Image: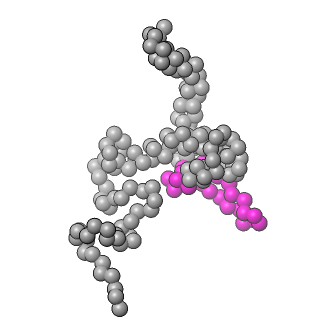
Amino acid sequence: MNAVPTPRPGALQPPGALAPPEAVPPPGVAPSSGAPSSAAADGDAFRGDCPGRTVLDHVTSRWGVLILASLRAGPLRFYELRDRIGGISEKMLSQNLRVLVRDGLVDREVEPTVPPKVSYALTSLGRELSDPLQSLIDWIATRTPQIVAAQRCHDLGTPES
């Protein structure tokens, strides 16, 4: 038998060698040493090694904010979310929902019908997060005219009034 030897922990592997399956993180997940860093304990998102930075990216992405805000009113089916969020493709919606479910912010419920009915709702963590996100969305809606005016002044090279 030609068994593939498993490298001992910490051993250097030649270029192109495959890592053992348990050492390969799932797609979209940064590799980890297994030991929590001080940034993880501190929750300091300004540090590059803080796991909160990944959550920040998921939550504050364009689609993440809109998905979480859309689910504030209650559970929605996939097509309802897609129709509610103008401009999102089914692929992007699916990818973002998968990430938010993994993060524990969104719950995915499948009803065993033919065809299966799948709905999405905020978890308790997601509901807790939705209030500040809605405040951000409200602030943007209120201040957009001022921001657009500032952009226009900047682009024309004139000072703001």
Residue at the (49%, 46%) spot, across then down: 58
Q: Nearer the viewer, residue 53 or 36?
A: 53
Q: How many marks?
A: 0
Residue at the (54%, 36%) spot, across then down: 133
Quarter of the image where the N terminus is located: bottom left
Residue 113: say if magenta: yes
- In the rendered image, residue 148, in percent from the top left (x then y), is placed at 54, 20
Scheme of colours in the image: one colour
Instruction: Identify whether 50 is placed above or below 115.
Output: above
Residue 78: say if magenta: no
In which quadrant of the rendered view does residue 74 lie? top right
Q: Is residue 114 left or right of residue 85?
A: right
Residue at the (38%, 70%) spot, across then down: 22
- What residue range appears in magenta? 97-122
- In the rendered image, residue 48, in percent from the top left (x then y), is placed at 32, 45
Instruction: Identify whether 114 is placed above or below 94.
Output: below
Residue extending farthest to the left is 11
In which quadrant of the rendered view does residue 8 lie? bottom left
Residue at the (57%, 22%) spot, across then down: 144
Instruction: Identify whether 112 is placed above or below 1.
Output: above
- In the rendered image, residue 126, in percent from the top left (x then y), is placed at 55, 46
In which quadrant of the rendered view does residue 83 lie? top right
